[in-house]
Every structure is written in C-alpha cells, then in structure tokens.
Amino acid sequence: MRIISERQLGSVLGALAGTPRVVAGGNFAAPRQALAVLDGALARYRLFALNAQPGMPDRPGVTLESPFVGPGMRGRRGLRYFPCRLSLVPALLADALPPDVVLIQTSVPSDGTVSLGTEVNVLPAAIEAVRARGGLVIAQLNPRVPYTYGDAEVPCDVIDYAIEAEAPLPSPPERSVSDASAVIGDRVAALIGDGATVQAGIGAVPDAVLARLDGRRGLAVWSEMFSDGVLGLAKAGALDPGQPVTASFAFGSADLYAWMDRNPDVRMLRTETVNDPAKIARCRRMTSVNSALQVDLFAQANATWVGGQVHSGFGGQTDFVVGALHSRGGMAIIALPSWHPKADVSTVVARLDGPVTSFQHSYIVSEQGTATIWGRDMDEQAGQIIEHVAHPAVRQQLRAAGRALGLRPVGALAGHRDDRDRPPGVVEQRVLDPADGRAGGRAVVPADHDEVGAGGVAGQHVGGVIAHHVLPDWHGGVLGMPRLQ
C-alpha cells in the first residue's frame, strides 16, 4: 500500500482508459473524499454501490449501477438497476459486472492490516474480482472508522494506493416511532422467545421490534446489517454472551460505532457468508423480520417497487426468508403498517402489480393484528391477511377482490378462526366493549394472563409479555381503490 496525495491519486485515476467500472463502499461508509477525486479525474465512468446515500456523484458521464438502490441513486435517469438477491451480488461482480477500480474506506493501518469497519458487505468479493483482472484497490484511510474483525480485516499489501482523510462516519437521521410501528413492534416481539437468532432489516418497523426485545435473554444476532437496536439489546443483557453479533454491514449513532471498535463480540463477515441461506438455516430458531411496501392476498410481499419505478431492491430479504424457513424452529416475518400515511392508501392489495420481493412467510403483521401464513391453504391465508393485517376500511373491498381472483377468504371477522391461527403461547378471551361494557370483540393474550382490557388496537406489557387487542371489524365508506374518504 502506497500512501499518496489526492493530486497524485487524481493522476492515477485520470490515466484509466475507456469507461471504467468503479465499485465503492455504500450505505453510510462511502469514501467521499476518494469519490470526489475520482469524479474530478474522469469524464466518464460507471459507479456501482449498494444503498448509496445522498451526495454520491451524479452528472452526465456517470452511469449509476446498483442491485439495491439507496436515496443517492433513487429516481436518477441514468440508473441501471440489477435485480439480484444480496447473496449473489459477489457472483455478479465476479462475472457479469467486473470492476476496474474498488474504492474503500478503512481504518488506519494496524500490524499490517486495515479494517473495513462498518461496511464489509460485497467489498471483499469486489477486491478479489478487481485483483483477478489487474485493476486497482484504493483506500481512504480514516482514523474514525472502527476497527472490526472477521472479513473486515484487509492486508495492507492488497491495497495499491491510499489517501488519508479524517472525518466522522455519518449517521442516519433519527426517526420517531409512530404509534403503528410501536404496536407492530409489540406484536412481532411477542412471537420471539428467549434463545432465538434474530435478523432485522432496515426501517422503522424492524427498529421498533428490536426495541421491544430487551427483556429477552440468550438472543443471537445473525443479520446482514444492524443498527442501534442491537446495541440496546447488548446493554440490556439480552444477547447470548457466547455468540458474537454477526453481520455484514452496520450504520447508526456515534455510540454504535464506538461500541463496534475492537469489540471481539462483533464479527463482520462478507455477504456471501452472512446471506447464505444454508448458513442462515443452521442458526438456532432463526427469526427473520423484514418490512415491505405492500403485501397481497397471496401472501406475496413487495419491498422493491413504488409508483412504477424501483425503490430499493431485493436486498437480503429473499435470502433470510428462505434461510429462516429452513431453520429448526425458525420463522420468517413480514411486518408493515396497514396504511401508508403519505400516499393515503392501503398497504394490503388484492394482487401486487409489480415485482415480488418475497413470498411464503410464517407471519404477516400489522398494527391491526398477526396473520398466520405458514401451514394455511390459499383461502385461509387470504382470510388471515384481510382479517388481521388489512385496515378495517378496506376489508370488504378486499374480500370482493379476492373472490374475483378465485379466492374464498375464510376466517372470523374479529378474531382467530381456530386454535391453529394463534401464535404460540396465546389464548383467546372475550373483551368488554368500552362503549357499553358488554362482551364485544375478542383478543389474543398471553396464556398465563387472566384478563385484558379493551379498546381498539393496542399492545401492552402484562407480566413481561405483550397483550394484543384486536379491532372489531368495521367497514368505512370506501370508493374506488383502497383509500380513506
């Protein structure tokens, strides 16, 4: 590794012929200074990154490429989106999209190695691919990057050139937890017991789930990514001390980055290891928790497509859904609010009109309830989704649309059809209608709890467990597409 100035790096990059493909670290670990030098040195190039954040180079002459589109590339006219599950992106780089340059941000050297820190992901595979064809590996050395172990460690002699640029790692903006996300977090957490292995995707709902697992014990984390929710579990003593947190990338607060630095309980591995469905399946009671933009009555989830254009990509959702279903005692959960507040539309539709991200899940959860999918026939699945996931305002319309599609949605209007429909460890009880005190709807509650209050949709801790209230069915005046009037 030769440390050079930014001017010298510009000369090196400016000598590249043609339209080189540059693979750069993504998420919140992009080597910004090196990218700026690249952009000033080359008139034309292809930039490949995962979940690129705002501020990435974007001008005529730059072709953006990604199998997982972040806000820094989303909606750009020159974007080339490559549908690909995350576990196969390394194969994509080795074959169809070989890089000419790899730009990485690393820690400063220590005993002949640097660390990729928070962003391992597909970078080891990209480094191997570019070295196999005689390309360049360029590092931005940043003392603020935490030194992490596993596949994050890269020998200095693998790197051709490096520049020095100290800057704090950026953090995602803080998100307030909505009432719907909080209830969803309670419902999903109620499905996860002590000793489970957890994977949580990106978003407010997975964050809310982790926040409600702090009372569990013996949890393991095997996840493509993690954020401050895992730090919270570690501080609460919820994690199994004999199992390192295993992931491929991370982003979050400065506290999270400090906790990761030289922490032997954190192991950062390459994507094709962490996202290998066979390895995921070997995890004890693997529980995959992912969000979606839409689900349909066939229990298919769309986490990729919005308004006729790509929003993100498959990511690792497909890998972890498959792996979790093959894990002994594992389950794959899709969690989402029943209503999209900005678009003012139902997130449950009769049939997806765009690409499917994942299917064949164990449960689908919204603030309305928990739909049991695994082990149900097609009509039962549709009934579960309508009764327990969809907003009450669109249930009648969804039933009619389901029948038009050849489905026969079945299930009680305000509760579970039979004992098979309940998550483990809950029983059904009558609840009092708050309006007149008479027995009204039904609720599912922990089996060791004797009574539960009523009143809309709620989730509350009772004796350290979550009690769920289920809204009675009602039909709002709905015209046309599912939309509140």
Image (cartoon, grey):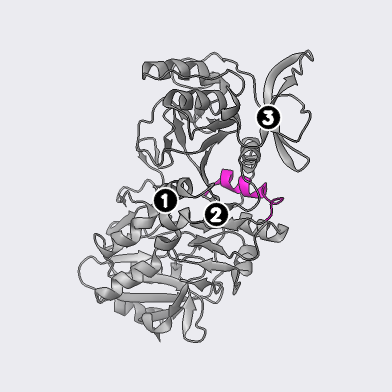
Residue 100 covered by magenta stretch: no
Screen quadrant of the C terminus: top right
Q: What element carries label 3?
A: strand
Q: Determine whether the residue tagged by mark 1 lies in a helix, strand or loop.
A: helix
* Foreground residue among 128 and 265: 265
In the picture, the disc for residue 427 is: 3
In the displayed structure, 410 sits above or below 55; it is above
Left or right: residue 422 versus residue 51 is: right
Question: How many discs mark residues in the rendered view?
Answer: 3
Q: In which quarter of the image is the N terminus?
A: bottom left
Above or below: residue 3 compared with residue 445 = below
| Residue extent of the magenta highlight | 202-217
Q: In which quarter of the image is residue 122?
A: bottom left
Q: Where is residue 426 in the image (x, y as percent from the top left)?
A: 67, 33
Mark 2 and 3 residues: CB-CB less than 8 Å, in contact? Answer: no
Q: Name the residue under label 2.
A: 284
Mark 1 or mark 3: whose residue is earlier in sequence: 1
Towards the viewer: 285 or 228: 285
Q: Mark 1 points at which residue?
A: 319
For image coordinates 44% across by 68% down, the residue present is 31
Picture coordinates of residue 376 (x, y %)? 47, 29
Q: Residue at x 47, y 82 (%)?
A: 113
Image quarter of residue 233: bottom right
Q: How far apart are marks 2 and 3 (CA)?
A: 26 Å
Q: Which of marks 2 and 1 is nearer the N terminus?
A: 2
Q: Earlier in the sequence, mark 2 or mark 3?
A: 2
Q: Residues within 10 Å of mark 1 (few under 14, many from 20)?
A: many
Label 3 Cα crowd, 10 Å radius (few <14 / some 14-19 / many 20+): some
> In this image, 423 relative to 409: left or right?
right
Q: Distance between the residues labelled 1 and 3?
A: 33 Å
Q: Distance between the residues labelled 2 and 1?
A: 16 Å
